[in-house]
Image (cartoon, helix red, strand yellow):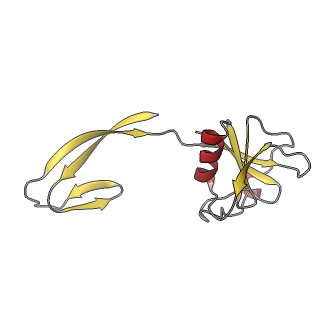
Amino acid sequence: MTVVTVNFCRCMLAVWLFSSIFCFSGCVGCNFITRQIIKRKTFTYMGCYMDKAQSRDLLIPGGHGNHMDPTECNEVCKKRMKTKFMGLQDGGNCWCGNKFNKYGKAKDSACNTPCAGNPKEKCGGRYLNSVFETA
């Protein structure tokens, strides 16, 4: 966890831009205030790893569905299952565990299935886990 100091503008005419507030030029009565915000550690991508149906690399099922993406899987694995790692497979399956790499690493480009919950992110492939360290 990191504490960051951010300056905000408080005035009658303000606009949200890139998650900050900026006053319009010539705004009357602007006051800049300083606030400290907490930036939480984000999960870390470890790579693309092979899996097998008969004996999973990450042992604990974390769920599946149209909402699944790395953020959702992290919530399940870190907060509920208390595991160190999470893997996303085949676009919408979340797996949790404290160790991985039973079957070896695959090329990162092989984990190219879009996540069901956020198609801009990649969530593994068929029997391939996009593995992350949870945060």
Residue farthest toward the left in the current orientation of the protein: 28
In the rendered image, the residue lying farthest to the front is 80
Describe residue 75's horizontal placement relative to residue 107 as left or right: left
Could you say which is closer to the camera, residue 51 or residue 75?
A: 75
The x and y percentages for residue 44 are: 61, 42
Q: Residue at x 76, y 60 (%)?
A: 90
Residue drawn at point x = 17 percent, y = 46 percent: 32
Work out which quarter of the rendered image holds the C terminus and state it: top right
Measuring from the top left, give residue 14's x and y in whole percent. 21, 60
Residue that protrudes farthest toward the right in the picture? 54
**Among the 4 quarters of the image, the one containing residue 100:** top right
17 to the left or right of 91: left
x 59%, y 63%: residue = 120
- What residue is drawn where x is 92% and y is 49%? 54
Tell me the quarter of the picture where residue 4 sits: top left
The vertical placement of 109 against 95, above or below, is below
Query: Can residue 90 be seen at all in this image of the molecule?
Result: yes
Could you tell me residue 40's position as x and y percent?
47, 39
State how many labels appear. 0
Residue 55 placement, left or right of 107: right
Q: Is residue 41 left or right of residue 3?
A: right
Residue 134 visible in the displayed image: no
Residue 36, located in which quarter of the rendered image?
Answer: top left
User: x and y percent of residue 110 in the render?
Assistant: 77, 57
